[in-house]
Amino acid sequence: MDITFKNVDYIYQENSPFAHKAIENLSFHIPSGSFVAVIGHTGSGKSTLIQHLNGLIRPSNGEVHIGDFRLTNDDKPKNMKELRSRVGVVFQYPEHQLFEETVAKDIAFGPENFGVYKRDIEKRIKEIIPAVGLSEELLERSPFELSGGQMRRVAIAGVLAIKPEILVLDEPTAGLDPRGQKEIMEMFYDLHQKENLTTVLVTHSMEDAVKYADHVIILNKGTKYMEGKPEEVLTQQEALNKVQLDVPEMIEFLYAFEKRFGLPIPFKRQSVKQLADEIQHAMKEAGSHE
Amino acid sequence: MREKLIEFRNVSFRYGEEEPWVLKDVSFDIYKNEWVAIIGHNGSGKSTIAKLMNGLLFPQEGEIYINGQVVNQDTIWDIRKEVGMVFQNPDNQFVGTTVQDDVAFGMENRGIPRDEMIRRIDESLTAVGMQDYRLTEPHRLSGGQKQRVAIASVLAISPQVLILDEATAMLDPKGRLEIMSTVSNVQDRNELSLITITHDLREVVQAERVIVMNEGVIWDEAKPREIFAKKDRLREIGLDVPFIATLADELNKSGLRISNEPLNHEELLEDLWTLHSKM
Amino acid sequence: MNNSLIIGQYVPGNTIVHRLDPRTKITIIFFFVIFVFFANSVLSYGILTLFAIATTLITRIPLRYILKGLTPVWFLIIFTFILHIFVTKEGSVVFELFTFKIYSGGIIQGIAISLRFFLLILVTSLLTLTTTPIEITDAIEDMLHLLKKIKFPVHELALMMSISLRFIPTLMQETEKISKAQASRGVDFRTGPVKERIKAVVPLLVPLFVSAFKRAEELAMAMEARGYQGGEGRTKLRQLKIESIDFIVFIIFGCVVIGLFVTRIY
């Protein structure tokens, strides 16, 4: 399903002394099957954006299209439940939504609400458990006995069990240690590639954006600040610094290297090993010219 | 010889009789005015160390001394005057209804006179750059700002050591930078030992000494530069090696000999420059 | 949903009413409520209404906003009015339809009682609109001071109140977050039969309790780490101070009271 925003405004607590605009005149288009990173500071409108994607809120002005679903301010659509069965959202600290007695029941909760047959749910659980890096022994345990990292995986499994066509991730690795962060991101990237799952990743991490996304949207104070391919957008150091964002560390190093040595090395999402070779080559060549 | 501030002597700890040991025979010293980073993956026992230091937990085996005084039920109130802590969750340690009420909380507990409190609130909020938010309510602050207030609250009781127990783990990059620069500022200006507990290797660069925890034991104890040099083994225990250390490693492999383990971009560029001028 | 939460919520400002000592405000409201119950003439109602409206205007809070906040109460006021018209059978008949008669006494009574009701609610909501909850807590702690002598845990009560106040916004955010997460997993909180809707609350309440307990545990630990050992030997930063403005307001209110007594006598 494609995602389209057309001149979307969203105002919290409209017509009260506490009203404030969270999103202003936001337009963009995400084709089906992309991996998009949405980047911005706390308060840039990221979480407001996400809530439009499965109809938790509707735009104050403008239009949102998710596949055939259309969200506007005037009409109250009745098929929100269907939309939610096709757009899965992993919220920040998703382990806070666990509530069932057992892990299996909690994972089954979403699909049950959307009317999936019991037999199918069981099948889905069998597939998902290894995919999120859990073992089947945990299925009959209480989710509250698990470690923080395991709880996170159970919560993610609960969203994946819905079998969404669009997966929305709101800082899915917050609070995990480096190994956990890497495992979770690799898992989502795998899913995206294997099942061609449209993925919207909201993140603070420029490193994750540059590593996984094929399209980035930068938000600042509720408006779209930049949009494009990661290697085009995330290399614009000056523009990003202006809104207090940093470029990914490798790009920062490349700029510093160029400034010091006068040798430009273009960023093309190369590995650190490739980069080391390029630096070695560039320096050798510069040396032989002198 | 520097004066010892904190001593752990063969400390072992577990949460219950049936539970596995979280710390196993851990011994180390921390000196006055020193900055020590404790690093390890989640569940390595690093946060338990912090809670043992001011008597929020007590070890089953071994002893802990603060300023030569053993930590036990009778001494905790004295010890908590000397050991200030900032925890992970910015919300769950903010007691006051406004910033200044929160900074006052610890001083109120210790019966500090009101005039003195007002003076110290000013001082400590200025030290963390939050002097303009004295009357702000917590839900109007960012996570980074709340953590700065938490640091100010600790400074206001002028302890001898400030422990940051994963104080940046729940913050965005901006908040993390805020805290890291606040902390190094504060340590420069005050007579204060600093213990930062983290799983982020980038946050240990400024420390004088690093204690690496793994599975409840001290895995290594050395200067940041020496720790950075053990890249592959750090990855094995679930830690992430910073970009600059990885690059230095790859450069070495590609034939550019980087002699000194670089800690930041400038150091690596400097090394490369030296090589360049020799070519 | 958000609108109903605003009722009585503090609206920041810097008017005289905002700056008054909360104890002054509570005392005046206490007596105002008593006088409203004793009002019995057009003139006494007039004086009280004038006082309430004047105070409202001084706060500079938009009248539209206050009236909107009173929406749920309008129903009660109108209900009281209608009840009196039906029940009271005094004075002359004003209106007659078949056997149904409305008496002048009923209308007067209805207006009087509804007005009473309206004044009570207006004035008490002015307190919460112009005073931060923590100021009210401070005032209560101070005014209950005498109870300390009979071992009533005034300090603990005040601390509990202020911590609750501190965490209300946090828990509200949390509730919203969890209900959105569960809505995304297909829970419908708004439609469907009552039984289903009650069932839908479980996935909301369980996580809320779990998180509230976790917060409480962490908060207790943080408080202990910061040297909290109960009220003994504690000093206080927050201090209430009666200023000259409080005296002036008391004098003005005194004049209103004298006015009321005069109207009762003559």
Image: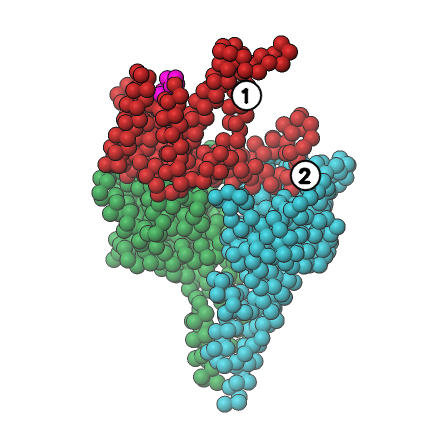
Chain colours: A cyan, B green, C red
Q: Sequence order check: which comes first, mark 2 or mark 1?
A: 1
Across and down, in percent, residue A142 comes to: 60, 34
Q: Is residue C12 visible?
A: yes
C-alpha distance separating marks 2 and 1: 40 Å
Residue A290 lies within the magenta run: no
In this figure, what is the number of numbered marks?
2
- A222 or A274, which is in the foreground? A222
Which numbered tag is attached to residue C79?
A: 1
Q: Is residue B10 left or right of residue C213?
A: left
Q: Which secondary structure, mark 1?
A: helix
Query: Crowding near pointer 2: few (<14 within 10 Å), some, many (20+)?
Result: many
Looking at the figure, which quarter contains the C terminus of chain C? top left
Residue receiving disc 2: C186
Q: Is residue A119 left or right of residue A251?
A: right
Residue furthest out toward the bottom: A290
Q: Is residue C52 left or right of residue C84?
A: left
Residue, x 31% and y 54% (percent of image)? B127
Which numbered tag is attached to residue A193?
A: none
Q: Amino acid at mark 2?
A: Gly
Tell me the quarter of the picture where residue A276 sits: bottom right
Tell me the quarter of the picture where residue C37 sits: top left
Considering the whole magenta stretch, tell me its main secondary structure: helix
Provide the chain ID for the residue under circle 2.
C
Q: Is residue B34 above or below residue B109?
A: below
Q: Is residue A14 left or right of residue A79?
A: left
Q: Amino acid at mark 1?
A: Phe
Provide the chain ID for the residue under circle 1.
C
The magenta span reads C34-40
Residue, x 43% and y 22% (percent of image)? C116
Q: Is residue C66 above or below residue B248?
A: above
Across and down, in percent, residue A122 comes to: 74, 38
Q: Is residue C101 above or below residue A162?
A: above
